[in-house]
Amino acid sequence: MSKRVLEVENLTTEFHVEAGIARAVDGISFHLEEGETLGIVGESGSGKSVTSLSLMRLVPCPPGVILPSSKIRINGQDILKKSAREMQKIRGSEIAMIFQDPMTALNPVFTIGSQLGEVLKRHQNLDNNASRKRGIELLDLVGIPDPTQRIDNYPHQLSGGMRQRAMIAMALSCNPKILIADEPTTALDVTIQAQILELISKLQKEIGMATILITHDLAVVAEVCDRVAVMYCGRIVEESNVFDLFEKPQHPYTRGLISSIPRIEDAGADRSELYAIPGMVPDIHALPDGCRFADRCFQVEDKCRTEDTQLADTGDGRRVSCLFPLGQGAQTA
Amino acid sequence: MSENALLEVKDLKKHFPIKGGIFRKTVGQVHAVDGVSFTLQPGETLGLVGESGCGKSTLGRTIIRLYDVTAGSMKFQGSDITNAEGEDLRPVRRNMAMIFQDPYASLNPRMTVSEIIEAPMAVHNKGIKSERREKIADLLEVVGLRAKMANRYPHEFSGGQRQRIGIARALILQPKLIIADEPVSALDVSIQAQVINLMMQLKDQFKLTYIFIAHDLAVVEHISTTVAVMYLGHIMEKASSKALYANPKHPYTQALIQAIPIADPKKRKAAGEKQTLQGDIPSPITPPSGCVFHTRCPLAEERCKSEVPALRNLGENGGEHLVACHLV
C-alpha cells in the first residue's frame, strides 16, 4: 500500500454569521495517497471549496472556525496545531493551491515574474537573478510560449489559459507534495480546458505529487481522477474509485448527478427528457433531521427522514452514506 | 422554403469601435460578428456554439436589435428589420424574446416577480390589470413556480427558480422566437437538467422557435435540431445536430468535440492519444487573414492564410451540411 500523504479526520468548518451557525463542512474524513488524483465533486454550496480552504488553513477567521476536533495530517503532522508562521512555510512547499479564477487570484499590479519571484525568494531563499532564471524555467515547464518575454507581463496581458498556466507555475514553484486545484478549468473554454487538464496530469506524473481536484463537472472527474468523493450539504455521501462510481453508483444522489449530464457520445439517440433531480439543495441553516438528500431522493422511506446516515464501508474501498444504498438488493426502485 | 422562413440573416456584421487617444478617435474595430448568414425555419432550434469571444452572444443580441447592425440584412417574418427603429421595432420585439445567462443580474432586485413578468405587457399595452394578473399566475405555474410567489422579490429565489422567472418573462407576450443566451451555464448540473427539460417542454406547448446560445456542446446537442459552430465571428460549420456530432467535417468542430470531457472513465483516452488544439483564440481586433482558424488548424496550408473559405454545402441525400474549409 502506498503512503498516505494527507489524512483528514472529522473536519468540521463552521461560519458564525448573523443568521446563525452555518456548518459548511460537517465532519468529513478522507485521505490522499502518494501520486494519486482525488476528485471532490459537488454542486454549489456542498462545501467542496470550504474543504479546500480548510486544508490550506485559509478559511477567513472570523467568521470561519475549524472545530478543534478536526484533524488534518500532512505526512503525519497535524497542520491544525501549527502556528501561523509555521503554516506559511507549509503552504507552497508541502501543499499548494490553484484557484478557479486566475484573474482574481493574481495581483493585477505586479508582473508575473515578481509574483513568481516572491514565492521563490521566500521559500527557496533564491536571490533576484536566480529566481528570475527559475521563473523562466517554470513558465517554460507549464507551456507558456516565449517565457523570457512573458515573465515581465502583467496578468491582464495574458489570456485566461495563460494566466491559469502562470498560476500553476506559481503553485509548482516549490515542488509541493500536494496540489489542490479548485475548479481550475471552470472559467476556461473547452479547448483551453483540455490543454490545462493535460498539463496538470503531465506535471503530476513528472513531479509525482498527489492532487485534489475540486470540481462540479463529473465529466472532468471521469477524465482525470483515480478516486472520487461526492459531497452534498457539507458531507461526503459517497467515495469510490472512479470506474465503479460511474458504473455502479451506490448513492441515489450520485446516480442522479450522473444521469442528469447531457451526453454527446450517444449523439443521434432520441432526445428524451434528461433525468433531473427534483427540488433543490436545502438551506444550510435549516437542514433536515434525517438524510439531507431525503427530500430529493427517488427511493426515500420514512426511516430516511428521522435517522441520520453515516458513511459506511461497502467493500472494495468504497464508502456510501445511505440507509438503502443502490445495488445492494435492499432498494425499492 | 425561404418564403416561410421565420428569420433570414444575410451577411450580418457587427463591429464595435475602439476609441483611444485624447480625442476619442476610433483606433480599431472589434470584429465580433463578421459576415454571418443563415435562415431559421419555424419550429427549429438553432444551437450556436463556440468558445468565448467567437461572437455568439453578439449575434443573438444583434438579431433582437439590442445592437445596431454594422452591415448586412435581417428579415423577420418576411419584413426587413435591419434598421427598424421606434414604432417599427415594437412588433419585432413583441415576437422575439430573450433569456439571459445570469439569473442574478437580469432581474431587477427592486421589482417583485409579478412586476418583472408584467413589464413586457405594460410596454406593449396588453390587457387590463386583472387579465394581466391572471396571465402571470398561469404562467408561473407553467414554468414550475407557484402563483402565490408573484409578490416576492428575486433575492428570495434560487438560481434555477430565477431562471424560470426569466423564462416566464420571455413567454408572456407569446413570442415566436426566443433567443436564449447561455440560459443554463450559471446553474448546477441537477438544476440545469430541470431547466433544459422545461425549455423543451415549453417549445412543444407554445410552438416556439429557439436560438440557443451556449458554449457547452453536450447541452446544445441535447436541445438543438440544427447546430452552427462559430469561431471569431464566422460560422465554420452548420448542419443538423445529428450530422454535426456524428460526422463533424470542419477541423475546428472536430477539435472542439474531441476536447469535451466524457463522463465515462472507461472511455478515457491515454495521454498523447488526444488531439488537443494548441494556442489561444486570436484577437477579434486583428483577426487572421484568410481562414480565421488557420493559426490553430492542424491541417492549414498556404492558401488558408490568404483565401477566405466560403460556406459550402457538403450534405448528402439533400441534407444541409455547410462547411467553411478549403480542405474538405
Image (spheres, grey):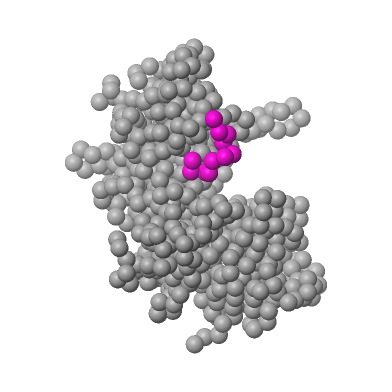
What range is drawn magenta here?
Answer: B151-161
Residue A71 location (% of width, % of height): 64, 76
Which residue is more in the foreground, B60 or B19?
Answer: B60
Picture layout, residue B157 above or below residue A269: above
Residue A287 quadrant? bottom right
For residue B237: magenta?
A: no
Viewer can see residue B257? no
Residue A208 quadrant? bottom right
Residue visible at 45% across and 59% down in the picture: A305
Residue visible at 52% across and 86% down in the picture: A2
Which residue is more in the foreground, A16 or B192?
Answer: A16
Residue visible at 28% across and 47% down in the picture: A272
Viewer can see residue B193? yes
Instruction: Give the number of marks.
Output: 0
Picture layout, residue A265 above or below residue A241: above
Residue B292 location (% of width, % of height): 47, 44
Quadrant containing the N terminus of chain B in the rendered view: top left
Q: Main secondary structure of the magenta part?
A: helix
Residue B221 location (% of width, % of height): 35, 47
Among all residues in the image, which is located at the extreme top? B87
Picture layout, residue A103 above or below residue B119: below
Among all residues in the image, which is located at the extreme left? B317
Picture layout, residue B285 above or below residue A63: above
Residue visible at 38% across and 40% down in the picture: B198
Which residue is more in the foreground, B294 or B253?
Answer: B253
For residue B158: magenta?
A: yes
Residue A201 as seen in the image, left or right of residue A252: right
